[in-house]
Image: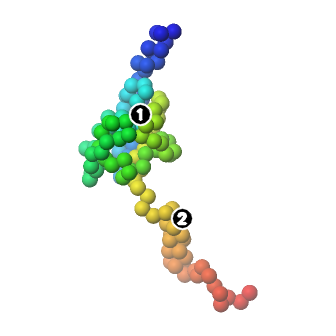
Amino acid sequence: MAEAIQSVASCRLSIEVVWIGVDPPLRVTLDVEAGTTVAQALAASGMAQLIPDRSVSESHDGSVLPWEADALGVACFGRRVSLTDPLHDGDRIELLPRVMVDPKIARQRRADHRRRLAGERRWTPDRAV
């Protein structure tokens, strides 16, 4: 039983860290110990050298991150995760840029812009019913 616990503890996880803020996205594949948290994997990824204008900050578990935790969103396969969440084999950690405009407002602006280009009016109060 103790041997099984030791073999699980010494497992290596293969994960991928992706920064979505650039085109094409930056990808780093890591081989980390089992029990590694999201913050530890981000610090080990080396994205600090690749991401411009990010300052160093300390995460919840004491590890140093090469950017401010509030500046980028962190997700795993498109779902928000905490920096203290443990990783699983095959996880893909995504660094997402901060949302600058509410998605509903952005969609409304795009729709209004398309209508103006097409010459349509959204509201037509003078139209005969």
Q: Tell me the crowding category of disc 2: few under 14, some 14 to 19, or many 20 or more residues within 10 angstroms, Cα based.
A: few
Residue 26, compared with residue 108, is above or below; it is above
In which quadrant of the rendered view does residue 14 lie?
A: top left
- Residue under numbered circle 2: 104
Instruction: Residue type at mark 1: give it.
Output: Thr
At horizontal 67% and vertical 88% (from top left) the residue drawn is 127
Q: Where does residue 93 sit, x and y in percent of width and height?
A: 43, 40
- Judged from the image, the secondary structure of the residue bearing numbered disc 1 is loop
> On screen, 112 above or below 85?
below
Q: Nearer the viewer, residue 58 or 92?
A: 58
Q: Is residue 110 left or right of residue 65?
A: right
- Quadrant containing the C terminus is bottom right
Task: Compare marks 2 and 1 and give the one earlier in the sequence.
Answer: 1
Residue 126 in the image: state x and y as whole percent: 65, 90
Q: Position of residue 1 (x, y in %)?
A: 51, 9
Residue 13: x, y in percent?
42, 27
Q: Is residue 95 visible?
A: yes
The mark found on residue 37 in the picture is 1
- Please indicate, yes or no, whether residue 20 appears anywhere in the rendered image: no
Residue that protrudes farthest toward the right in the picture: 129
Q: Tag 1: Cα neighbours inside 10 Å, few (<14), some, or many (≥20)?
A: some
Along the horizontal axis of the image, is 65 left or right of 77? left
